[in-house]
Image: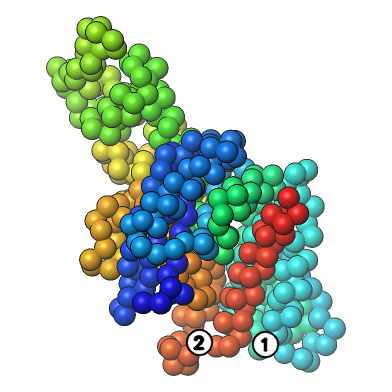
Amino acid sequence: MEQKNISVGLDIGTTKIVALVGRKNEFNKVEVLGVGKSKSLGVHRGVVNNITQTIQSIQQAVEDAKMNSGHHVTDVSVGIAGQHIRSIQHSDYITRENPEAVIDEDDIQKLIQQVYKLVMLPGEEIIHVLPQEYKVDGQGEVKEPIGMHGGRLEANFHVVVGQVSSIKNIGRCIKSSGLNMANITLEPLASSEAVLSFEEKEAGVALIDIGGGTTDLAIFKDGIIRHTAVIPFGGNVITEDIKEGCSIIEKQAELLKIKFGSAWPGENRDTEIVSIPGLQGRDPKEISLKTLSKIINARVVEIIEQVFLEIKNYGHNDQKKKLIGGVVLTGGGSQLKHLKQLVEYITGMDSRVGYPSEHLAGDTMDAVSSPLFATSVGLLMSALEELPAVIPSVKSVDKDIKSSRNENQPSKDIIQQRKSILDRFGEKLKEFLDNA
């Protein structure tokens, strides 16, 4: 296999940095050739707060991935997330000079560029504009306006906003690590590519990615991204609570959470005790598993209730916005025992744990098929796609046109639209980084 067919996904998380080197096999499945993983030392809640430490962690993860795969790594597909990311819904329109001419790509780009001119808070910039439904001369629910006639082109947009300084800091870390940022993807979108099916996105689904520092939410309906949010709490806060509540060190708290932790206190009996070795010859400390699960439950309930508030803000009680696909949990925090049941109890929605294994080749190592690597696999998939499918609305268009076209020959207009929007997203962010 030639080097040009190899791609790299780089997930810069709060607890870990993961580099996945991979390629697509003849069955269009992702074959992971090498995994590099290092402890993330300079990132807090998804935001870089120590450039030097982050660079060292990135270099270690990438070096491990090079060693394991035997391939040289230069270009990486990077994910952006963090508590500074927020999203807004916006509607805008343009009046076309010649209504008799058909709507083309230039009209759509003119409309998108108009959205980029929205005034944001100081230090914030629009980093992603995702078109949803269009209207042509008042006719609604148009998924693909190219080729139609009309004087007024209107659209609803999902606009993602972030702190310029935070994005620039990630760019600096990548460049200083000797790497080139080939592609940038929002992490909730990357995770969704790895664990959600097309049917779920059509039916309506909420993806909850519980990471170490933050919990990311992405809501899809009718195959279109409808809402994204970042909750500034994750698995690290649970570990911190255990550390404080049980008066033990962080390493012991993390092990307790992984081995004996449960999100449902009713499961443990009062008599269940675990013994923790004491420090420097001190007596061992005995901890009740019921107490442990109560500490975990209190924090997890807080996180899930904040996520559920975002879901309610989206308006899932509205019949047209109903999320039939329920909730999909992923990320390292989704492996907590009885979390699925607690989420169903709080939200009243069906839930499942999302694994990226569906997109992985059969001989790919089992470790990568864990929810822990959902974002990493999604970033690698994004890097491997010649036309990265991070815009659900384009997928919806593809589905609609398949009935009238050969599946293997998508519309040139659709390909051009997908390319231009993604290129513009990458160019916009690279402008921030180049001006750093």
Check disc 1 and report its element: helix, strand or loop. loop
* Front residue (pair 156, 128): 128
Residue at the extreme left of the image, as rendered: 271
* Front residue (pair 359, 24): 24
Residue at the extreme top of the image, as rendered: 282
Residue drawn at (55%, 57%) of the image = 179
Residue drawn at (53%, 37%) of the image = 53
- Tell me, yes or no, if residue 250 can be seen here: yes
Please tell me the numbered disc located at residue 410: 2
* Front residue (pair 360, 51): 51
Please tell me the numbered disc located at residue 148: 1
Could you tell me the amino acid type at mark 1? Met
Residue 350 x, y percent position in the rendering:
33, 51
Depicted 407 relative to depicted 232: above or below: below
For this view, does 248 lie left or right of residue 109? left
Please tell me the numbered disc located at residue 250: none
Residue drawn at (49%, 47%) of the image = 58
Residue 131 x, y percent position in the rendering:
63, 68
For this view, does 203 lie left or right of residue 96? left
* Front residue (pair 54, 387): 54
Could you tell me the amino acid type at mark 2? Pro
Which image quarter is the N terminus in? bottom left
